[in-house]
Amino acid sequence: MTDRPPYDRRMLEALVCPLTQTRLRFDAEAQELISDAAKLAFPIRDGIPIMLVDEARQIDT
């Protein structure tokens, strides 16, 4: 077993918010991609970012 995360960090950096087309911020502790512009947190499940607005949770930032 390796200590590598189950996702490609460069791939995460290339993703944008599906609503605002703005850059996302990675929250490693919560395993989420944060859209500050849309105030949404998109989950990463089993190393796969779930970029569906219906799956995102509302955040207060």
Image (cartoon, grey):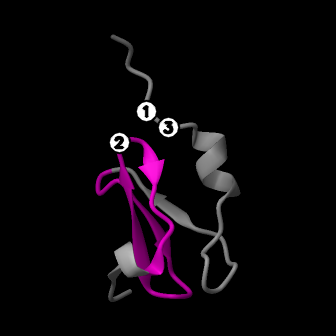
User: Which of labels 2 and 1 is toward the front?
Assistant: 2
Q: Are marks 1 and 3 in contact (CB under 8 Å)?
A: yes
Residue under the image location 52 percent in, 88 percent down: 38
Mark 1 = which residue?
A: 6
**Nearer mark to the viewer, of 3 and 2:** 2
Give the extent of the magenta segment: 29-53
Residue pointed to by mark 3: 7
- Residue at 48%, 58% (x, y): give it: 26
- The picture places residue 42, in percent across and down from the top left corner, at 42, 68
Q: Amino acid at mark 1?
A: Pro
Above or below residue 13? Residue 20 is below
Q: Determine which quarter of the picture holds residue 44.
A: bottom left
Say which element carries label 2. loop
Q: Is the residue marked by circle 3 packed among few (<14), some (14-19), or many (20+) residues within 10 Å? A: few
Residue 56 visible (yes or no): no
| CB within 8 Å, label 2 to label 1 | yes
Q: Secondary structure at mark 1?
A: loop
Q: Nearer the viewer, residue 46 or 13?
A: 46
Amino acid marked by disc 2 = Asp
- In primary-sequence order, the first of circles 2 and 1 is 1
- Of the 4 image quadrants, the one containing the N terminus is top left
Image x and y of residue 43, in percent:
37, 62
> Looking at the picture, how far across and down is residue 27, in whole percent?
40, 58
